[in-house]
Amino acid sequence: MVGDLLIKNATLVLPSQVVEGDLRVSSGSISSIARGGGLEPNIDEPVIDATGLHLLPGIIDPHVHFREPGHIENEDLESGSRAAAAGGVTSFLDMPNNSPNTTNRTTIERKISLASKKSVTHHGFFIGATKNNVLDLQSVEGMDGVCGIKVFMGSSTGDLLVHEQENLEEIFANTGGIIATHAEDEERLQQRKTEFNHRTDIASHAECRDVECAFLATKRAAALAKDHDHRLHIVHLTSGKEADWIQKNKADLITTEVCTQHLTFDQDDVERLGERLLMNPPIRYTEDRDALWRGLRNGAIDCIVTDHAPHSLEAKSAGFPDSPAGMPGVETSLPLMLTHAMNGKCSLTEVVRWMCEGPARVYGIRDKGALIDGHDGDLTLVDLENRRTITDSDTWTKVGWTPYAGMELTGWPMYTIVDGEVVHKREAGGSLRGTAVAKSGSSGRLLKFE
């Protein structure tokens, strides 16, 4: 039957322990977990011998920009979901800064329809807030596939921006669900852009969009959430000052995330790699990177994301400040984090907590995020023993490059499985790029939220 699969002899990364065993998926859902193994194949049941591999829940990336509709020369829902699958990501949440922006029910329904025909993984979408679309935000509350409201408090890319207090108050007071904020203070940002407009060195990016710019908006968003008793998720924390403040002032209403690149790079990497690492908010300093790791460990930060935001290398080559901000990352996030784990920065269990359990909990995604009986059969089998150096040509993203080119990573997904069906696989010793198995729109569903 469709969605039936038996995985034998795997190392299972369960919520409370890592053990050898077998796992069965029946009709798309996990139906049996056998610690120590012993499950026998049913008649005509597909079997994967996972000897030497670790079995993880499918990764959830709750912050991607797959560019459709609009700039599909950089990415679209098919190419983005295939890149996700290549990286062990089985569910994604896509941001609303498209062309046209996703700011009402009609544009949300269009994206849902496109994804149903193109995506090979599970998917959900944010609706974007504007200064005057509260009725539109209300019209999609509780709608399948709509994960929350995105508010850009500071100008980043596109033309979605809400920073005036009265408009923010109206949104927080009159909507439900979760509000996800890009927290940079617009007034300070514009002031500092004027002060820094003579600088063309890329180091000035982090100086201009400084920690205080992010911190002011983070505190402001947290105050709005508390004043209106509204769930708030602060996207891509970048500084130690924010993480330390959140750890002391978080409360139950507030959750946060961090990007893989902010856990990996610092000012020296920005100097070395240039515009490839240009993004908003910027990659900051060694002390900020270290503080973000502390924030993960002490609970200030709930999940890890990529903010996958691809631009072509041609566009990037314009040089700072003309180069667009953003970089691809959805297909490298899991190998990157597993490499950090194998290098002693964290444990396998923590990687699963931050990349699977955390996003599922933050957004209330049903039946995702852990190897538990009854949960959906979204899985990835990874090889922790095979270190491979990634190059630009190994990528599935349309833009054909990665900021991690030249890095030796481990934990490459050998099988990515959606509802019990293999959608991407690699062969031992074969191409690092692997093979796309699923046909467009043949796998993946619209996500549902609690």
Image: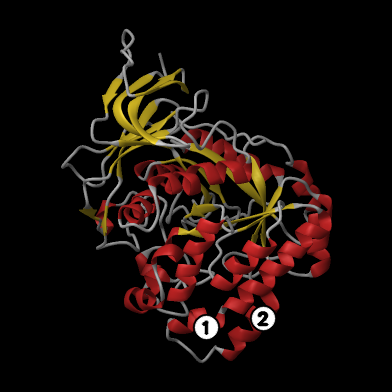
Spot occupied by residue 187 in the image (x, y as percentages of width and height)? 70, 79
Q: Is residue 36 above or below residue 250?
A: above
In this rendering, does residue 171 appear at all?
Answer: no
Which disc is residue 323 wearing?
Answer: none
Which disc is residue 207 wearing?
Answer: 1
x 44%, y 52%: residue = 75
x 44%, y 79%: residue = 320
Between residue 191 and residue 106, name the one nearer to us. Answer: 191
Spot occupied by residue 297 in the image (x, y as percentages of width and height)? 50, 57
- Is 351 on the left or on the right of 40, as rendered? right
Amino acid at pointer 2: Arg
x 46%, y 77%: residue = 322
- Is 99 on the left or on the right of 331, as rendered? right
**Residue at image mark 2:** 188
* Colouring scheme, one of rainbow, by chain, secondary structure, one colour: secondary structure
Question: Crowdedness of circle 2 by 10 Å Cα count: few (<14), some, many (20+)?
Answer: some
Quarter of the figure with the C terminus: top right
Q: Pick whichever of labels 2 and 1 is earlier in the sequence.
A: 2
Q: Find the residue positioned furthest to the top.
A: 43
Q: Is residue 424 above or below residue 62?
A: above
x 62%, y 34%: residue = 448
Amino acid at pointer 1: Glu
Label 2 element class:
helix
Spot occupied by residue 270 in the image (x, y as percentages of width and height)? 38, 75
Q: Is residue 157 above or below residue 396?
A: below
Query: Which image quadrant for residue 435?
Result: top left
Label 1 element class:
helix
